[in-house]
Amino acid sequence: MFQNRAEGLALALPAALFAALVFLVPVVLLLSEGFRNADQWTLSAYVDFFSQPLNRTVFLRTLKLSALVTLVAAVIGYAAAYAIVSLPPGAKGRMVGLVVLPLMISPVARTYAWIVILGRTGIINQALQAIGLTDEPIRILFSETAIFIGLLQLFLPLMIISLISALENLPRDVVPAARVLGAGWLSVFWKIILPLTKEGLVIGGTLVFTGSMTAYITPAILGGSKVLMLETLLYQQVTVSNNFVAASVIAFILIVMSFAANILLKRIASARRSGK
Amino acid sequence: MIRRLFTPLTLFLMMLFLIGPFLIIVAASFSAGETLAFPPQGFSFRWIIKVFTIESFRQSFGVSMFLAIGGTLAALILGIPASYAMSRYRLPFAETVRFLVSMPIIVPGIIVGLALLRYFVIPVGMSVTLALFVAHTALILPYAVRVVSASLANLRADIEEAAVILGSSRLGAFFRVVLPNIRGGILSAFILGFVTSFNQVPVSLFLSGPGVRTLPIDMLGYMENVFDPSIAALSSLLAFLSIGIVFAAERFLGFSRYV
């Protein structure tokens, strides 16, 4: 450890100044726009924002879809992570690699695939018509369902990875022991697996939830201009309505959500380090 | 019976959901037909070839490459000294510095882009290219600091103290002792930064201007107007590029140790 404070500060200063100048100051100024009216501080922009039915719908839809994606990702994530953890070491490593792989692919490419699958002439509609369930193509694209599917596919790997590391720390014998003593699978999950992997679930859950809340590409491609989420609403407010105050309100909501999630994650990480 | 089937069935369904759509895109990009469809009509390379002939893709690919390489290098030039200071010096305001440089990862990209546009780019009168460059540098900085910090933490501090005691200058010790030892971490940070910047959409959304756009933004615009398989072809090409880079990195550097 070197003691020269000035030298240390000189090394760190360029990065810190850069981040402050191009990042902190502009973001703070943008957020302050939502709290100012002429020369005084006010919450009227927030009252205005939430008084409009469209904005309320979008806000609630964003919360609802994010919560739903997180919930379903947790259910699938547990099944997938449990299956992966029970594989022999070599196969496990390859499987983890395959789960991580989609994270390296451009989200635009990953989301675009759903147009081919869910579109009017897509695979789902072809299949439905082939088996005679419907005569006309049904509309799946540009709906909440489409956004839900896209978000789930985008963020599921994060949940699986978090749960794999949690399940790997599960003591080896607890599940067989509970089974031998007569516990059913459901009570094994509720009473043993869930409490012991809670941290992994919270970490994965926060990543999926904030990821979904702040996603832009998925609702832009799969929701279209009608089924908006907060980020696409923000984009529309700026580019179509030129309403920077509303944009600032949305930005504040999104930032509060992200920071709350981040603080939660830090808490968990530090609780784990100190060995609780 | 059900127990025996659980593992393979779960894994199969999961992979179908995670990788399946990507395979469909790859298949669709070899289509011979005019419109995007699956199963593809016939087999040809026409859309793969067409991607290279579309002028705007060539331009935006250049912009994205420049931002990914230049932005990552700039982030490393800022980030390496900062990481070094945070790990080796008793730094006043260490937490503030850490918070500042890691914040762009927490704040959603679309907000970063809008704030930068309104309160920095426009007042300063910056060009579109420079604005994108600055934004991408800020975006990559947290990754650079995190990865380089991790590899500094794994390097014992006393070897450079030994070098200094034996008569090397502080700077000489850094370049001859520290830098060669964190080479793998720096390369990993570079790759992570490159992929992050290259795939980034929200930050560039507001900052892209007439004639200067990143490739993903260009793709979003193109797919709104044209419904042919060229986006599928381009998506597959890009995906294989990213996968190839990450694969090579994992093989030669043990990338996942740092990330």
Image (cartoon, coloured by chain):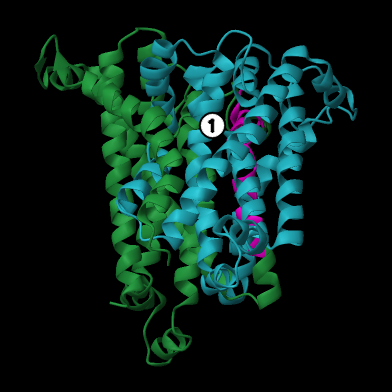
Chain colours: A green, B cyan
Chain for mark 1?
Answer: B
As drawn, is A135 to the left or to the right of A14? right
Res B75 → quadrant: top right
Please report the residue visible at 45 percent of the width from the left and 40 percent of the height from the top: A15
**Position in image of residue A48 (x %, y %):** 16, 16
**Position in image of residue A251 (x %, y %):** 31, 27
Report the magenta residues as a range: A95-122
Which one is in front, B220 or B30? B220
Which one is in front, B259 or B37? B259
Residue ranking furthest to the right: B44
As drawn, is B238 to the left or to the right of A10? right
Could you tell me which quadrant the N terminus of chain A lies in? bottom left
Please report the residue visible at 59 percent of the width from the left and 34 percent of the height from the top: B71
Question: Which amino acid type is shown beneath numbered disc 1?
Answer: His
Residue ranking furthest to the front: B167
Looking at the image, residue B49 lies above or below residue B242: above
Looking at the image, residue A185 lies above or below residue A47: below
Q: Majority secondary structure of the magenta segment?
A: helix
Looking at the image, residue B198 lies above or below residue A137: below
Please report the residue visible at 37 percent of the width from the left and 43 percent of the height from the top: A210
Q: Based on the picture, tell me whether residue A241 belongs to the magenta stretch.
A: no
Q: Residues within 10 Å of mark 1 (few under 14, many from 20)?
A: many
